[in-house]
Image (cartoon, rainbow, N blue to C red):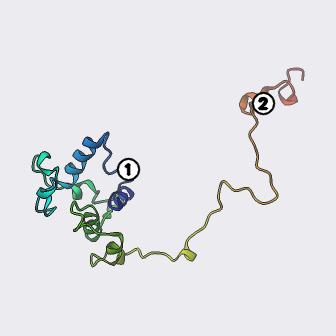
Amino acid sequence: SVGCFFAELLLQKPLMQGKNEQDQRDKIVELLGTPDEDNWPNFNLLSGAKHVRYKKKQSVLREKIPLYSYTGDPTLSDRGYELLKGLLSYSPKQRLSARESLLDEIGYFDEAPKECKPEHMPTYPSSHEVPKGQKKRVRSPVDTGAAAAFDDDDKRFSRDQ
């Protein structure tokens, strides 16, 4: 899951959006390649592995993640790609845990830009909170839009002038 979240932050859209369980499996295989003994040791020992048949496909993960942004800078470095690949590994034994990702020798989190201390982060007032002492404004069900400007009570638009 963390690998999918990471990729979706980069892509700004869902990584694999299947319509049902079978479609989701197909999308995973399209992206990560066909599961086999090379990328998932002991895969063939899984109870359902004998019933799953896919054409042999290579991973297209690197092609899926954009190499360049609109400024021409890479959106994901080689270190970031290695991290993502480790997070999306088929094999649970080879897949990086969150702890391993942070401590890993891949070094993605050592790259610039460095993290910012929370006290140096900008803050913004909540748009949902009302300052103390003020009442929350409730919109009237009466039309207050452009048509309300032409009410007979509004003397600016009276025909009697």
**Residue 70 visible, this angle:** no
SS at mark 1 in the image: loop
- Pinpoint residue 51: horizontal percent, then vertical percent: 13, 45
Between tags 1 and 2, which lies in front? 1
Relative horizontal placement of residue 156, taking residue 7 as reference (left or right): right
Distance from the alpha carbon under mark 1 to that under mark 2:
43 Å
Q: Residue at x 30, y 40 (%)?
A: 20
Relative horizontal placement of residue 92, taking residue 161 as reference (left or right): left
**Residue 143 visible, this angle:** yes
SS at mark 2 in the image: helix
Identify the residue position indicated by label 1 in the image.
13
What is the residue that sits farthest to the right in this orientation?
161
Which is more toward the observer, 30 or 114?
Answer: 30
What is the residue that sits farthest to the top in this orientation?
160
Relative horizontal placement of residue 52, taking residue 23 as reference (left or right): left
Q: Within 10 angstroms of label 1, few (less than 14), some, or many (20 or more) residues?
A: few
Identify the residue position indicated by label 2 in the image.
149
- Pinpoint residue 5: horizontal percent, then vertical percent: 37, 58
- Pinpoint residue 151: horizontal percent, then vertical percent: 81, 26
Mark 1 in CB contact with mark 2 (< 8 angstroms): no
| Mark 1 vs 2, N-terminal side | 1
- Pinpoint residue 44: horizontal percent, then vertical percent: 11, 56
Q: Quadrant of residue 77?
A: bottom left
State the quadrant of the N terminus: bottom left
Label total for image = 2
The kind of residue on which mark 1 rests is Lys
The kind of residue on which mark 2 rests is Ala
